[in-house]
Image: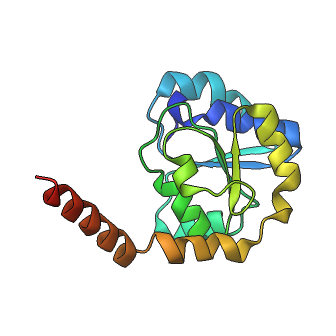
Amino acid sequence: RIHPDKGTKEAIEIARKAGRRLVIAGIIQDRDYYDCWVKPYLNKPDVEFIGSVGPDRRNEVLGNALALLHPIHFAEPFGLSVVESMACGTPVIAFNKGSMPELIAHERDGFLDSNVGEAVRAIEQIEQIDLKICRRTVEERFTSEIMVKNYIGVYQEILAQL
Protein backbone atom coordinates (compact mmCIF):
# COMPACT_ATOMS: atom_id res chain seq x y z
CA ARG A 1 0.00 0.00 0.00
CA ILE A 2 1.11 3.55 -0.68
CA HIS A 3 1.31 5.06 2.79
CA PRO A 4 4.04 6.71 4.89
CA ASP A 5 4.24 3.60 7.11
CA LYS A 6 5.34 1.52 4.11
CA GLY A 7 8.18 3.86 3.12
CA THR A 8 7.38 4.39 -0.56
CA LYS A 9 9.20 7.74 -0.47
CA GLU A 10 12.29 6.04 0.93
CA ALA A 11 12.06 3.21 -1.62
CA ILE A 12 12.19 5.82 -4.39
CA GLU A 13 15.17 7.50 -2.72
CA ILE A 14 16.99 4.17 -2.27
CA ALA A 15 16.46 3.06 -5.87
CA ARG A 16 17.46 6.41 -7.34
CA LYS A 17 20.62 6.63 -5.21
CA ALA A 18 21.52 3.10 -6.24
CA GLY A 19 20.90 3.90 -9.90
CA ARG A 20 18.20 1.22 -10.19
CA ARG A 21 14.74 1.22 -11.70
CA LEU A 22 11.89 0.95 -9.20
CA VAL A 23 8.51 -0.64 -9.83
CA ILE A 24 5.93 0.31 -7.19
CA ALA A 25 2.89 -1.90 -6.71
CA GLY A 26 0.04 -1.45 -4.26
CA ILE A 27 -3.11 0.44 -3.46
CA ILE A 28 -2.99 4.16 -2.78
CA GLN A 29 -4.08 4.39 0.83
CA ASP A 30 -2.89 7.96 1.45
CA ARG A 31 -3.65 10.17 -1.58
CA ASP A 32 -1.83 13.25 -0.19
CA TYR A 33 1.31 11.20 0.45
CA TYR A 34 1.11 9.71 -3.06
CA ASP A 35 0.59 13.12 -4.66
CA CYS A 36 3.51 14.67 -2.75
CA TRP A 37 6.13 11.89 -2.61
CA VAL A 38 5.37 9.42 -5.42
CA LYS A 39 3.56 11.10 -8.30
CA PRO A 40 6.31 13.70 -9.01
CA TYR A 41 8.77 10.87 -9.76
CA LEU A 42 6.53 8.94 -12.15
CA ASN A 43 7.53 11.07 -15.13
CA LYS A 44 11.08 9.86 -14.69
CA PRO A 45 12.10 6.66 -16.54
CA ASP A 46 13.42 5.02 -13.37
CA VAL A 47 10.17 4.93 -11.33
CA GLU A 48 6.99 3.15 -12.41
CA PHE A 49 3.71 2.75 -10.50
CA ILE A 50 1.67 -0.28 -11.62
CA GLY A 51 -1.10 -0.14 -9.00
CA SER A 52 -2.49 -3.12 -7.19
CA VAL A 53 -1.59 -6.50 -8.70
CA GLY A 54 -3.20 -9.89 -8.26
CA PRO A 55 -1.35 -13.12 -7.48
CA ASP A 56 -0.25 -13.95 -11.03
CA ARG A 57 1.11 -10.50 -11.82
CA ARG A 58 2.56 -10.20 -8.30
CA ASN A 59 4.54 -13.39 -8.78
CA GLU A 60 5.77 -12.14 -12.16
CA VAL A 61 6.79 -8.73 -10.79
CA LEU A 62 8.47 -10.11 -7.67
CA GLY A 63 10.02 -13.05 -9.49
CA ASN A 64 11.71 -10.74 -12.00
CA ALA A 65 12.87 -8.18 -9.43
CA LEU A 66 16.41 -7.79 -8.15
CA ALA A 67 14.96 -7.31 -4.65
CA LEU A 68 11.89 -6.17 -2.75
CA LEU A 69 12.48 -2.83 -1.02
CA HIS A 70 10.57 -2.73 2.27
CA PRO A 71 11.69 0.42 4.15
CA ILE A 72 8.86 0.37 6.68
CA HIS A 73 8.33 2.95 9.42
CA PHE A 74 6.27 0.93 11.87
CA ALA A 75 6.46 -2.33 13.79
CA GLU A 76 4.81 -4.44 11.10
CA PRO A 77 3.39 -7.57 12.75
CA PHE A 78 4.12 -9.97 9.87
CA GLY A 79 4.95 -8.69 6.38
CA LEU A 80 3.19 -10.92 3.88
CA SER A 81 4.85 -9.19 0.91
CA VAL A 82 8.24 -10.13 2.37
CA VAL A 83 7.33 -13.83 2.42
CA GLU A 84 5.73 -13.58 -1.02
CA SER A 85 8.93 -12.06 -2.37
CA MET A 86 11.14 -14.77 -0.88
CA ALA A 87 8.72 -17.43 -2.21
CA CYS A 88 9.52 -16.07 -5.68
CA GLY A 89 13.23 -16.42 -4.93
CA THR A 90 13.65 -12.67 -4.53
CA PRO A 91 15.62 -11.27 -1.57
CA VAL A 92 14.28 -8.47 0.59
CA ILE A 93 15.92 -5.26 1.75
CA ALA A 94 13.92 -4.04 4.74
CA PHE A 95 14.25 -1.59 7.57
CA ASN A 96 14.86 -3.52 10.77
CA LYS A 97 11.50 -2.96 12.47
CA GLY A 98 8.67 -5.09 13.77
CA SER A 99 8.72 -8.68 12.57
CA MET A 100 11.40 -8.17 9.92
CA PRO A 101 14.18 -9.89 11.93
CA GLU A 102 11.85 -12.87 12.39
CA LEU A 103 11.31 -13.14 8.63
CA ILE A 104 14.66 -12.15 7.13
CA ALA A 105 18.05 -13.63 8.02
CA HIS A 106 20.44 -10.70 7.46
CA GLU A 107 22.85 -11.40 4.59
CA ARG A 108 21.29 -14.85 4.04
CA ASP A 109 17.94 -14.16 2.34
CA GLY A 110 18.00 -10.38 2.45
CA PHE A 111 19.25 -7.39 4.40
CA LEU A 112 18.00 -5.68 7.54
CA ASP A 113 18.95 -2.03 7.46
CA SER A 114 18.33 1.06 9.56
CA ASN A 115 18.34 3.83 6.98
CA VAL A 116 18.42 4.77 3.31
CA GLY A 117 22.22 4.73 3.07
CA GLU A 118 22.48 1.19 4.42
CA ALA A 119 19.74 0.05 2.03
CA VAL A 120 21.62 1.55 -0.93
CA ARG A 121 24.73 -0.40 0.13
CA ALA A 122 22.58 -3.54 0.43
CA ILE A 123 21.52 -3.18 -3.20
CA GLU A 124 25.19 -3.10 -4.14
CA GLN A 125 25.63 -6.42 -2.29
CA ILE A 126 22.33 -8.08 -3.24
CA GLU A 127 23.86 -10.44 -5.77
CA GLN A 128 25.68 -12.26 -2.95
CA ILE A 129 22.29 -13.61 -1.83
CA ASP A 130 21.52 -17.10 -3.15
CA LEU A 131 18.01 -16.91 -4.59
CA LYS A 132 17.43 -20.59 -3.84
CA ILE A 133 17.93 -19.87 -0.14
CA CYS A 134 15.17 -17.24 -0.28
CA ARG A 135 12.77 -19.84 -1.66
CA ARG A 136 14.00 -22.50 0.78
CA THR A 137 13.35 -20.16 3.72
CA VAL A 138 9.68 -20.00 2.75
CA GLU A 139 9.44 -23.75 2.18
CA GLU A 140 10.99 -24.47 5.58
CA ARG A 141 9.23 -21.80 7.65
CA PHE A 142 6.18 -20.27 5.98
CA THR A 143 4.07 -22.86 4.17
CA SER A 144 0.46 -23.01 5.35
CA GLU A 145 1.10 -26.47 6.86
CA ILE A 146 4.09 -25.29 8.88
CA MET A 147 2.38 -22.07 9.97
CA VAL A 148 -0.73 -23.96 11.14
CA LYS A 149 1.40 -26.51 13.02
CA ASN A 150 3.37 -23.74 14.74
CA TYR A 151 0.23 -21.79 15.68
CA ILE A 152 -1.33 -24.92 17.18
CA GLY A 153 1.88 -25.48 19.14
CA VAL A 154 1.72 -21.94 20.55
CA TYR A 155 -1.96 -22.36 21.45
CA GLN A 156 -1.18 -25.64 23.22
CA GLU A 157 1.59 -23.96 25.22
CA ILE A 158 -0.77 -21.18 26.27
CA LEU A 159 -3.50 -23.64 27.24
CA ALA A 160 -1.02 -25.71 29.27
CA GLN A 161 -0.24 -22.62 31.36
CA LEU A 162 -3.90 -22.00 32.29
Say left or right for 60 vs 131. Answer: left
Answer above or below: position of 12 versus 111.
Answer: above
Q: Quadrant of residue 42?
A: top right
* Nearer to the camera, 114 or 45: 114
Which residue corresponds to the image point at 54% horizontal and 56% vertical from the top-left? 103
Residue that appears at 46% across and 69% down = 142
Q: Residue at x 58, y 71 (%)?
A: 137
159 left or right of 146 in image: left
x and y percentages locating residue 126 in the rendered image: 81, 57
Q: Tell me residue 129's x, y (percent).
A: 78, 65
Q: Residue at x 51, y 21 (%)?
A: 32
Vertical comparison of 35 with 161: above or below: above
37 lies left or right of 13:
left
Q: Is residue 42 visible?
A: no
- Observer able to see residue 64: yes
Please, is residue 33 above or below residue 118 in the view? above
For the residue pair 120 and 110, the one nearer the viewer reads as 110
Q: Position of residue 102 (x, y in %)?
A: 52, 53
Extreme residue toward the front, this view: 161
